[in-house]
Amino acid sequence: MPKSERNLEEREEVEKRKEKIKRTARITKFWLSGVITFLSSILLVLIFRIGEAYWTLWLVEHRKLGIGGALLLLVVVSLLSPAIIEANSNTRTLQGPGHDPRFGPFFTKK
């Protein structure tokens, strides 16, 4: 196979890999936005006491605790979202004993 054809195949493979990374990042962003929206809606319901007549007694008594928990989760998910997107889209394979050439043939998979 000529060198130019090999380079073309390698470039196509790189493009496919980049497209897969972009698609995974889009899907992760979609789900993260859903989680953030869900937590925000819970937080707004608790802050403005929407539908308080239908709440259970423990929720009425511990409303501030619920606000604090929802707010904490919202802040944590919002701050960690870039790291979550990066970890999902650019996964790295971990080296194990069967993949590291420094360990020699004793640890290779059979």
Image (spheres, grey):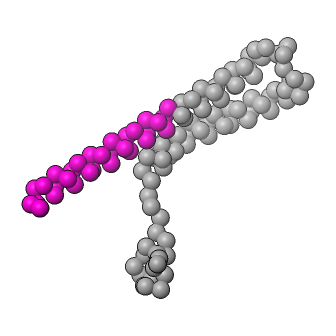
Where residue 91 appears, as percent x and y from the top left, is 45, 53
The vertical placement of 9 against 37, above or below, is below
Residue 2, by quadrant, is: bottom left
Give me the residue at 33% from left, 42% from top: 19
Where residue 65 appears, as percent x and y from the top left, is 80, 32
**Residue 13 highlighted magenta (yes or no):** yes
The vertical placement of 48 against 32, above or below, is above
Residue 31, by quadrant, is: top right
Q: How many marks?
A: 0
Question: Which SS does the magenta portion mostly show?
Answer: helix
Where residue 69 appears, as percent x and y from the top left, is 73, 35
Give me the residue at 68% from left, 37% from top: 72
**Residue 12 highlighted magenta (yes or no):** yes
Relative to the observer, which residue lies in front, 109 or 40? 109
In the picture, the quarter occupied by the N terminus is bottom left
The vertical placement of 79 against 104, above or below, is above
What is the span of residues highlighted in magenta in the rendered image?
Answer: 1-30
Give me the residue at 43% from left, 35% from top: 26
| Residue 90 appears left or right of 2 | right
Give me the residue at 42% from left, 85% from top: 104
| Residue 60 appears left or right of 45 | right
Where residue 42 appears, as percent x and y from the top left, is 70, 25
The vertical placement of 12 against 33, above or below, is below
Relative to the observer, which residue lies in front, 82 or 97? 97
| Residue 33 appears left or right of 50 | left
